[in-house]
Image (spheres, helix red, strand yellow):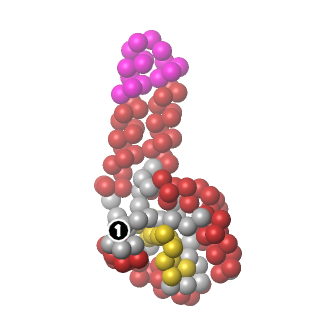
Amino acid sequence: MTRAWTLPMLLVLCGSALATGLTLRGTPGAAAAILLVFVLLACVNSPLIFPRSVGTLEAQRRSAVDGRPVVFWRPGCKYCIRLRIRLGRSAQHVHWVNIWRDPAGAAAVRAANDGNETVPTVIVTGRPHTNPDPAWVREQLFRST
């Protein structure tokens, strides 16, 4: 759990340090802008923007029932963030597995990617797809409903 929050906390601390320095130099407006940018970056890289993760076995069970894709992801991954943002509201209908929280998920990703933990890895009808186009994932999601 702590590992997922390391980057967001580091971003907030760095932004706070820069903002403090700018405030002490007499530029509070620039300090506020810098702090806002760093807080936004922290939010984007936090686990908060992703729907609730489930375990690998639960995601596979749910996918077998409803046919929806399973997305293996990890916090801080820019490709995972891109996928999440481009899916928009439909992201809540995908089964998300955080590989940093689920060792079985990390093992499944390594098995699909020649031993590498390359994310996002999307499983659709039992077949892995590494870093697929978000439009393709959205299309697969709508095919399943």
With respect to residue 81, does 117 lie above or below? below
- Work out which quarter of the rendered image holds the C terminus and state it: bottom right
Residue extending farthest to the front is 114
Q: Per the image, is 21 magenta?
A: yes
Q: Image check: 56 left or right of 94?
A: left
Q: Nearer the viewer, residue 24 or 78?
A: 78
Q: Position of residue 31 (x, y in %)?
A: 47, 23
Amino acid on which the number 1 mark rests in the picture: Asn
Decide whether the magenta segment is chiefly helix, strand or loop: helix
Residue 96 visible at all? no
- Work out which quarter of the rendered image holds the N terminus and state it: bottom left
Q: Position of residue 78 (x, y in %)?
A: 48, 53
Q: Position of residue 108 (x, y in %)?
A: 38, 77
With respect to residue 104, does 7 lie above or below? above
- Where on the picture, by quarter, is residue 20? top left
Q: Which residues are magenta?
A: 17-31
Q: Could you tell me which residue is drawn at 47 percent across and 65 percent down? A: 120
Q: Image check: 145 left or right of 120?
A: right
Q: Nearer the viewer, residue 88 or 117?
A: 117
**Residue receiving disc 1:** 116
Q: Image check: 18 left or right of 124?
A: left
Residue extending farthest to the top is 26
With respect to residue 3, does 114 lie above or below? below
Residue 114 visible at all? yes
Residue extending farthest to the bottom is 65
Q: Position of residue 43 (x, y in %)?
A: 48, 46
Q: Image check: 58 left or right of 141?
A: left
Q: Could you tell me which residue is drawn at 67 percent across and 72 percent down? A: 139
What kind of element bears circle 1?
loop
The mark tally for this picture is 1
Q: Could you tell me which residue is drawn at 36 percent across and 67 percent down? A: 117
